[in-house]
Image (cartoon, rainbow, N blue to C red):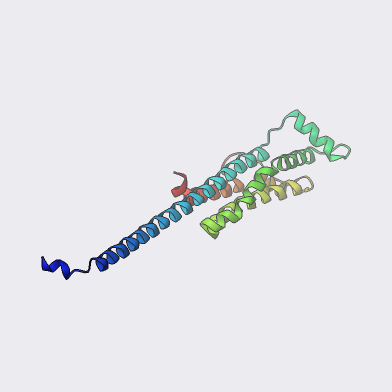
């Protein structure tokens, strides 16, 4: 029984206590790191959902803006807003389309609001897909503004192809589709 006197039980207890504290610190550090990664992932997922939601709503709104179909009420409202005698059908159509753009402003603003969060969480390339959509919107806006005044038939037809949505083969639709595909690919991990 003499060997028990050779063991310093207090030193062993101190080492055991220090080991337990060190183990707890490592465990806490790992758990904190896991929590931080999960929190970051969750924020990225929210950003992706918000950006896609804004994009899809704006895409649908752009199709409505570009629709050549109009109700009588829309035509009448456009004629009244023009404040000119005997407006041409092109002027009425351009004004009608402009009204639609203004009515959908919240959708455009929602996409613009997603630019910075998307860039912060996903980088410049993913943000560029949202900017590409906004570029297509600007092309439609400019086309509408110029359309009513131009007399050049070829140029007018080119503008009509830009701002009328007929099928998915026009330049604006192709640009919007590329932006959508890029966003969906960038966000795939976070949206399922």
Q: Looking at the figure, which quarter contains the N terminus? A: bottom left
Q: Residue furthest left?
A: 1
**Viewer-side residue, 190 vs 74:** 190
Q: In the rendered view, does 81 fall on the left or right side of 117?
A: right
**Viewer-side residue, 94 vs 18:** 18
**Viewer-side residue, 111 vs 174:** 111
Q: Position of residue 192 (x, y in %)?
A: 44, 43
Residue at horizontal 77 percent and vertical 41 percent from the top = 95
Instruction: Give the total number of marks visible in the rendering.
Output: 0
77 w.r.t. 151: above or below:
above
Q: Residue furthest right?
A: 85
Q: In the rendered view, does 164 fall on the left or right side of 38?
A: right
22 w.r.t. 110: above or below:
below
Q: In the rendered view, does 55 fall on the left or right side of 75?
A: left
Displayed quadrant of residue 73 = top right
Residue at horizontal 39 percent and vertical 55 percent from the top = 31
Q: Answer whether residue 66 is visible to the viewer in this image.
A: yes
Q: Position of residue 100 (x, y in %)?
A: 72, 39
77 w.r.t. 187: above or below:
above
Q: Position of residue 26 (x, y in %)?
A: 35, 61
Q: Residue furthest top?
A: 72
Q: Answer whether residue 165 is visible to the viewer in this image.
A: no
Q: Position of residue 90 (x, y in %)?
A: 77, 40
């Amino acid at each position: 029984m003499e060997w028990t006197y050779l063991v310093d039980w207090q030193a062993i207890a101190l080492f055991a206590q220090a080991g337990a504290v060190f183990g707890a610190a490592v465990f806490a550090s790992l758990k904190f790191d896991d929590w931080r990664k999960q929190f970051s992932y969750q924020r990225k997922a929210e950003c992706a959902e918000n950006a896609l939601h804004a994009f899809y709503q704006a895409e649908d709104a752009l199709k409505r803006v570009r629709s050549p179909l109009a109700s009588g009420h829309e035509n009448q409202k456009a004629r009244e807003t023009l404040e000119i005698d005997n407006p041409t059908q092109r002027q009425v159509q351009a004004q009608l389309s402009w009204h639609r753009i203004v009515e959908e402003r919240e959708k455009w603003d929602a996409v613009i609001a997603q630019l910075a969060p998307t860039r912060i969480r996903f980088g410049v390339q993913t943000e560029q897909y949202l900017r590409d959509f906004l570029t297509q919107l600007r092309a439609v806006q400019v086309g509408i503004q110029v359309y009513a005044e131009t007399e050049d038939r070829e140029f007018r037809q080119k503008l009509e192809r830009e701002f009328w949505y007929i099928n998915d083969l026009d330049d604006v639709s192709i640009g919007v589709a590329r932006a959508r595909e890029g966003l969906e690919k960038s966000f795939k991990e976070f949206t399922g």
